[in-house]
Image (cartoon, grey):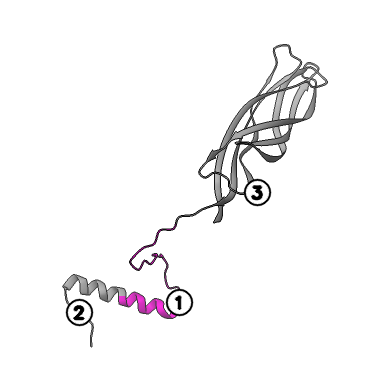
């Protein structure tokens, strides 16, 4: 028995966030998403990720005569479906959630009524469940040595190895050993 990844899941989400600033916006000058935090728990065959991020919108208002930054914290809850390679046996699995793409603004618009921002936010999460599992090991009947690619970096061997390689190349070209005894 050993610990290994027994299940994985991945979820990419695009959602629209509606925000109402205190002033009716004239135009959007910039939008960014920051301060992403999250935590996860296993619920059945899913990982439930609860998180939040801050959306900041820089905008003009009062007929383009003033600018402000509106900021709002946005909560979310995602369910990531798990694909099992091996069924859990101990009930003491470890949950790991990695953020592939932090929440990011892909589009920012002013609503048709002219009072709100419609912000399109994308994010991508990968979840893994680490638990106890059985491992099969292949036994090779013959001696097996893994090949490693490395060079001898020693300065005392470098010159000798260079001459040895040249001698071997000449030997291969002529078909006989030209090195002195």
Residue that label 3 marks: 92
Residue that label 1 marks: 154
- The mark lying in front, picked from 3 and 2, is 3
Tell me what residue is drawn at x 60 percent, y 41 percent.
127
Mark 2, other Cα within 10 Å: few <14 / some 14–19 / many ≥20: few
Residue that label 2 marks: 177
Mark 1, other Cα within 10 Å: few <14 / some 14–19 / many ≥20: few
Q: Number of callouts in the render?
A: 3
x, y percent for residue 122: 62, 31
Quick one: SS at disc 2? loop
Mark 3, other Cα within 10 Å: few <14 / some 14–19 / many ≥20: few
- Closest to the observer, 137 or 156: 137
Looking at marks 2 and 1 on the same chain, the residue that comes earlier in the sequence is marked by 1
Label 2 – label 1 distance at C-alpha: 27 Å
- Closest to the observer, 97 or 3: 3
Looking at marks 3 and 1 on the same chain, the residue that comes earlier in the sequence is marked by 3
x, y percent for residue 25: 76, 19
Residue 87 versus residue 28 in the image, above or below: below
x, y percent for residue 181: 23, 88
Residue 54 versus residue 94 in the image, above or below: above
In the image, is 3 to the left or to the right of 147? right
Report the span colored magenta: 137-164
- Closest to the observer, 138 or 172: 138
Label 3 – label 2 distance at C-alpha: 66 Å
């Amino acid at each position: 028995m050993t610990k290994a990844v027994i299940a994985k899941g991945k979820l990419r989400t695009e959602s629209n966030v509606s925000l109402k600033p205190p002033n009716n916006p004239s135009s959007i000058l910039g939008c960014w998403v920051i301060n992403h935090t999250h935590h996860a728990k296993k619920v059945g065959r899913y990982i439930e990720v609860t998180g939040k991020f801050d959306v900041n919108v820089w905008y003009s208002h009062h007929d383009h005569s003033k600018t402000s930054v509106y900021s709002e914290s946005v909560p979310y809850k995602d369910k990531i479906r798990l694909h099992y390679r091996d069924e859990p046996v101990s009930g003491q699995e470890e949950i790991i959630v990695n953020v592939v793409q932090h929440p990011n603004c892909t589009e920012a618009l002013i609503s048709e009524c002219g009072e709100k921002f419609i912000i399109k936010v994308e994010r991508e999460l990968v979840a893994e469940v680490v638990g106890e599992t059985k491992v099969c090991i292949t036994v090779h009947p013959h001696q097996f040595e893994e090949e490693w690619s490395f060079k001898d970096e020693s300065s005392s061997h470098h010159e000798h190895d260079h001459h040895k390689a040249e001698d071997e190349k000449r030997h291969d070209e002529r078909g006989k050993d030209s090195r002195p005894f």
